[in-house]
Image (spheres, grey):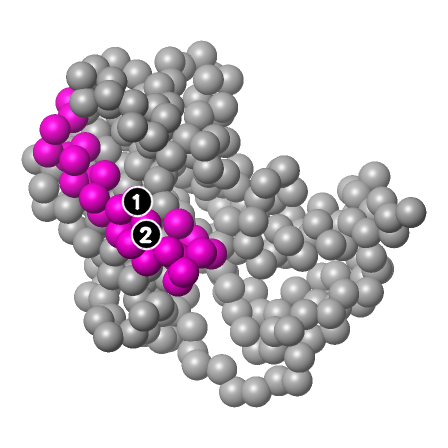
């Protein structure tokens, strides 16, 4: 393999992945936006990490550009040995409790504005799997967390707040659930996908998730045991959530850790609690 390319290397996952590969002695090319070399050099194994998350609703056209347009150009014009497209387990949301397996048939309402994210990711998956000459695979990531600078999302931001306050209030109900997976387990999964050979290299879609749904009520219990108080909104009925299958990920030798244990370890680590800002 001629090396590794990270498209979207300026983002949280892309940046962490590039550094992890360099730490292992690999050559990594992380092109800036508009870099003409993207279409003139051999890219080796490509991790397509470009995308929008929290601001997709107010930037729908940028979302499509990142999730689909650039990808289509890379697939049609660039030279590469393998391309792994980072997608999301959010694509299972409309399936409820029956969803969560990589071979599920997905369902979307094309008229719903929020579905610009899901539909563009699904189209990116289709191009990767069907228009890459058998060289494409998809990694569907669940809710990634850790304490690294720049980490965003519900749990990373909550943990950052917990460093300064012992009592936290969330506008989220106890019954809401998420599949949290640590960033280090995500990196391990992605690198395993990039390195898989032979039959193991015929990946298709792989859930990069913990496979466990952690409710806000359970999360509050983890915080309470560590000495925090986590106040939640009044409970109300919630739709059933899909549970992500992780058999394919484990088949690559990656065994995601229990997020409850990792959260407890973070909260009780020496020097974690900094106290109120003065």
User: x, y (%) of residue 156?
Assistant: 62, 51
Q: Secondary structure at mark 2?
A: helix
> In the image shown, does 192 or 79 lie closer to the viewer?
79
Locate residue 73: give its quadrant: top left
Q: Secondary structure at mark 1?
A: helix
**Residue 91 in the image: above or below residue 207:** below
Going 10% across and 46% down the picture, which residue do you hit? 130
Going 52% across and 41% down the picture, which residue do you hit? 183
**Residue 217 in the image: above or below residue 235:** above
Relative to 23, 194 lies left or right: left
Label 2 near label 1: C-beta < 8 Å?
A: yes
User: Where is the N terminus found, in terms of image quarters?
Assistant: top left
User: x, y (%) of residue 160?
Assistant: 70, 50
Residue 63 is labelled as 2
Q: Residue furthest right?
A: 278
Residue that badge 1 annotates: 66
> In the image shown, does 47 or 200 lie closer to the viewer?
47
Relative to 159, 252 lies left or right: left
Q: Is residue 89 visible?
A: no
Going 84% across and 60% down the picture, which residue do you hit? 166
* Span of residues in magenta: 52-79
Going 61% across and 56% down the picture, which residue do you hit? 155
Relative to 221, 180 lies left or right: left
């Amino acid at each position: 393999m001629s090396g590794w390319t990270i498209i979207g290397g300026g983002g949280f996952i892309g940046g962490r992945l590039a550094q992890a590969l360099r730490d292992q002695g690999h050559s990594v090319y992380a092109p800036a936006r508009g870099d003409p070399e993207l279409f003139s050099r051999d890219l080796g194994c490509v991790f397509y990490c470009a995308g929008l998350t929290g601001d997709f609703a107010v930037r729908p056209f940028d979302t499509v550009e990142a999730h689909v347009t650039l990808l289509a150009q890379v697939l049609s014009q660039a030279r590469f040995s393998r391309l792994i497209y980072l997608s999301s387990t959010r694509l299972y949301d409309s399936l409820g409790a029956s969803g969560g397996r990589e071979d599920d048939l997905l369902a979307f309402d094309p008229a719903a504005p929020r579905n610009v994210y899901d539909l563009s990711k699904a189209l990116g998956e289709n191009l990767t799997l069907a228009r890459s000459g058998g060289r494409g695979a998809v990694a569907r990531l669940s809710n990634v967390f850790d304490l690294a600078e720049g980490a965003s999302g519900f749990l990373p931001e909550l943990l950052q707040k917990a460093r300064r306050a012992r009592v936290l209030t969330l506008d989220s109900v106890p019954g809401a659930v998420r599949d949290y997976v640590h960033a280090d387990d995500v990196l391990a999964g992605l690198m395993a996908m990039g390195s898989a050979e032979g039959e193991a290299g015929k990946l298709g879609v792989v859930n990069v998730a913990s496979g466990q749904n952690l409710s806000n009520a359970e999360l509050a219990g983890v915080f309470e045991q560590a000495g925090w108080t986590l106040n939640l909104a009044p409970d109300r009925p919630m739709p059933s959530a899909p549970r992500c299958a992780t058999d394919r990920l484990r088949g690559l030798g990656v065994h995601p850790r229990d997020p409850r244990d990792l959260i407890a370890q973070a909260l009780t680590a020496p020097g974690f609690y900094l106290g109120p800002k003065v």
